[in-house]
Image (cartoon, grey):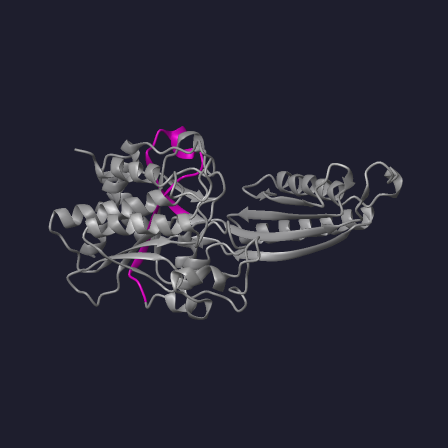
Amino acid sequence: MVSGGARAVARCDELGVAPYSDAPDMLFRAYLTPAFAAAQRAIAGWMIEAGMTTRIDAAANLVGRYEGLEPDAPPLIIGSHIDSVRDAGRYDGPLGVMLGIEAVAALHAAGRRMRFPIEIYAFGDEEGSRFATAMLTSRAVAGTLEPGMLDIADARGISLDEALAPFELSDLKFAEARHPGALAYLEAHIEQGPALEALGLPVGVVTGIAAQLRYIVTVTGVAGHAGTSAMTLRSDALAAAAEMVLAIERIAREDASDLVATVGRMEVAPGAPNVVPGKVVFTIDIRSGDQARRDRAAAAILTALRGIAAHRGTGFTSEQTNDLAASPCDPRLMDLLEAALVAQGVAPHRLVSGAGHDAMILAALCPTAMLFIRCAGGISHNPAEHADPADAEIALRVMLGFIERLDAL
């Protein structure tokens, strides 16, 4: 018989190929696309098999519900996301959803119900791969959407409202996805780092999530013929941007802490081999467990970039697209999760998440807990991403132990 953990991993693998990817040669599942809709249909079927009812909320999140002995009691939410970055691995996000389904399936097979309902959320947009604002759908559930946040369009100019239309949804009702209140939120996720593997541990308890800032930077120069534009007279937007990227790296390295800063996307225009670049748009992602440290670094980076633009004679603008505060996990829930972990014969270990997760948004709604699962080589956001089925099975047993302990409180 296939274990629940192995089945969870196998289902992530199934979702890693067509029709669950928007690209034929890699995994890329963006929010509100045909591949996204196909994935929702498959996952909804698995939820129903596990004994749940399903619905799509106003933000296009898929929600499965397993009733409790007290139907009106605030539910335990278990969730993660089903969208992906471009050329993604198969487990970042979906594994947490699949393990939540397996936890309910195990309870249903045993004829057990907790005093509280359990809701499994497959969040639609955590990565921000289609629209500039990440974690849009968990913000809707937590009730933390800000004015103007829904006035967005993707790279092809399709607005959020237009993208929602095939799902018979509208941005005017997006905020109606807000949850009325929950007992707790639990998210299982691959670690996306090497700590657990280095320690020889299958799972670990997350203590909190680092603070994040994201910017979109635009550098404007003057496009010109590559053969006739003298080097001393150029206003090369790409050369200026290249110096800026190195400055970002230098400032983060010199901090000598947990601070990290990344330029992950760059667009160069007009993009011809015989034209001096006249415009460059790139992203900056800045993170630290210490919010004040993050903010100091961001200020230093923006000051340095303005100086480079002035020295090189280019235009410079920056737009902040995300500001996510550091999010500590709930101490009581961490203790429950650790007790369930120890009961499985695993040495306890607690660690901070440098990556952002829907859990940091749900913290505005209810107490949160996170369980990290070992991933091979610490690799994530990469096709080489891998989670061992045996580790997933341990994670499932820990999650079930957590649910039982929460029910006993």
Residue 334: x and y, percent? 32, 49
Which residue is at a point 32% across and 66% down the rendered structure image? Answer: 181
In the picture, the quarter occupied by the C terminus is bottom left
Residue 253: x and y, percent? 62, 38
Residue 46 in magenta stretch: no
Which residue is at a point 35% across and 63% down the rendered structure image? Answer: 57
How many marks on residues?
A: 0
Write down the quadrant of residue 55 in the picture: bottom left
Residue 141: x and y, percent? 38, 62
Which residue is at a point 35% across and 34% down the rendered structure image? Answer: 387
Residue 198 in magenta stretch: yes
Left or right: 371 as drawn, with respect to 302: left
Which residue is at a point 15% across and 55% down the rendered structure image? Answer: 113
Most extreme residue toward the left is: 111
Left or right: 246 as drawn, with respect to 404: right
Residue 73: x and y, percent? 22, 65
In the picture, the quarter occupied by the N terminus is top left
In the rendered image, the vertical position of residue 101 relative to residue 173, given as above or below = above
Q: Identify the magenta region.
A: 181-207
Residue 145 visible in the current orientation: yes
Residue 402 visible in the current orientation: no
